[in-house]
Amino acid sequence: MANEGVAAERAVKAPPPETESIVWREDKGRFQTPDGEAFLQYRLLDGRGAPAAAVMDLVHTYVPRSKRGQGLAARLCDAAFAHAQARGMRVLPTCSYISDTYLPRNPALKELVDKDQEPHPKPSSM
């Protein structure tokens, strides 16, 4: 009976953050955790005078309260920036987490930011 309690306890523990991978869901336009609970939503834009889908507009990053503090938002951003860089794309950091927190912590990635397009206005919270 004591072993059943231990087994049940192991079954509900979440995997350590470093073992949880980030999945690219092209069909949904997002990068996400395997369970889909944490994600970074993007949309592809045409670049000025460049091939279609030359700019990845990083619109929204979401991590549920139960997963916060594990570095998931940064790992979602890492995946998106690596994806853009590998495909020769620029990024538009519309999401305030990316522009205000992630990029200042990762200044080398600012070279991928598209300077020709302005981020879309963020919705008012009023």
Image (tube, grey):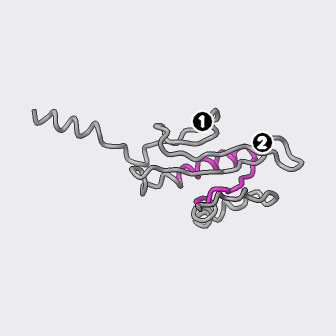
The location of residue 79, given as percent across then percent down, is 59, 47
Return the residue nearer the eye: 78 or 67: 67
Up-down relation of residue 95 to residue 22 (above or below): below
What kind of element bears circle 1?
strand
Q: Is residue 35 left or right of residue 107?
A: left
Q: CA distance from mark 1 to mark 2?
A: 16 Å
Which residue type carries mark 2? Ala
**Residue 85 painted magenta:** yes
Residue depicted at x 69% and y 47%: 84
Q: Quadrant of residue 43?
A: top right
Residue depicted at x 47% and y 42%: 37
The location of residue 3, given as percent across then percent down, is 14, 34
Which residue type carries mark 1? Arg
Up-down relation of residue 95 to residue 23 (above or below): below
Residue furthest right in the image = 49
Q: Is residue 113 left or right of residue 95?
A: right
Q: Quadrant of residue 39?
A: top right
Mark 1 lies on residue: 25
Residue interval drawn in magenta: 75-98
